[in-house]
Amino acid sequence: MEKSIQTQIDTLNDKVDLILEYVNQQRLKSQSVDDLISDVSIIGKDMYDSAVTELDNRSIELDPEDIKMIALKVIRNVRNINGVLDTFESTADFLKDASPIMNEMIIDLIKKLNEFDQKGYFEFLSEAGNIIDNVVTHFSREDIRLLADNVVPMLETVKSLTQPEMLKSVNNAVKIFSRIEMEAVPEYSIWKLMREMNKPEMKRAIGFMVSFMKNMSKPENDNQ
């Protein structure tokens, strides 16, 4: 009987110890919370005092009504702010994922620019800039206007000159001219010239010149 009572007493003591330990833990937690609140209050007060001092030094006045309106707007736009933050996070994730690709693109671009530099593209563009500078320097505004007015006929002329038959004729003429030695051109008397004119190739040349001059003298519409 006494042993049973002692067992019950021990059990009660254990439970009391547990209760006391729990109460002590709650007291410590409450004390920690109180200390935290006290520390936060001190920090908040220091921050408030520092902010007031800084604003006073800069002669900045805050209207409590304005602060209230800002707070209300922030609360009212919490969803929009969350959307902006989500977009920012998505953008950051995209940039993180795309950074290797962008690095590869930048490396490829640098290689291509180096290739262009090795081939002389940039030197060519630099000289082309000098050409444009010379054109701007030597031609007036009126010259440019006249050029603009006549650009279509000029392009038509270039188009005609680039036809295969015309290019072949011009190329032959240039080759023949380059083969003629100007200092060793033979002299022709009238009689010798008359004999040369009876040759077939001279007759064809004369026929070409006559046909060319006749067509040159025709109105423009007849030549089209």
Image: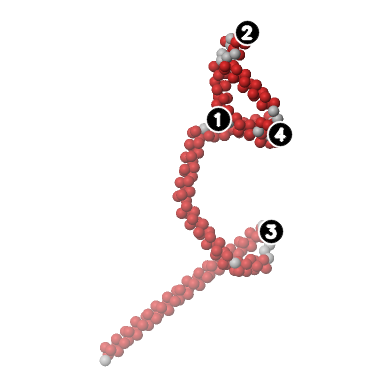
Q: Where on the picture, by quarter, is residue 204? A: top right
The kind of secondary structure element at disc 2 is helix
In three-dimensional space, the C-alpha distance between marks 3 and 2, rounded to whole angstroms, equals 112 Å
Q: Crowding at label 1, few (<14), some or many (≥20) Cα neighbours within 10 Å?
A: few
Please tell me whether residue 147 is drawn above or below residue 211 in the rendered image.
below
Q: Which mark is residue 164?
A: 1
Q: Which mark is residue 59?
A: 3
Q: Are marks 3 and 4 in contact (CB under 8 Å)?
A: no
Q: What residue appears at the point 68 percent right and 36 percent down from the top-left corner? A: 148
* Foreground: disc 2 or disc 1: 2
Q: Crowding at label 3, few (<14), some or many (≥20) Cα neighbours within 10 Å?
A: few
The kind of secondary structure element at disc 1 is helix
Q: Which mark is residue 191?
A: 2
The kind of secondary structure element at disc 3 is loop
In three-dimensional space, the C-alpha distance between marks 2 and 4, rounded to whole angstroms, equals 50 Å
Foreground: 154 or 121? 154
Quadrant of the rendering where the N terminus is positioned: bottom left
Dot 2 or dot 4: first in sequence order is 4
Three-letter code, disc 2: Trp
Quadrant of the rendering where the C terminus is positioned: top right
Q: Where on the picture, by quarter, is residue 159? A: top right
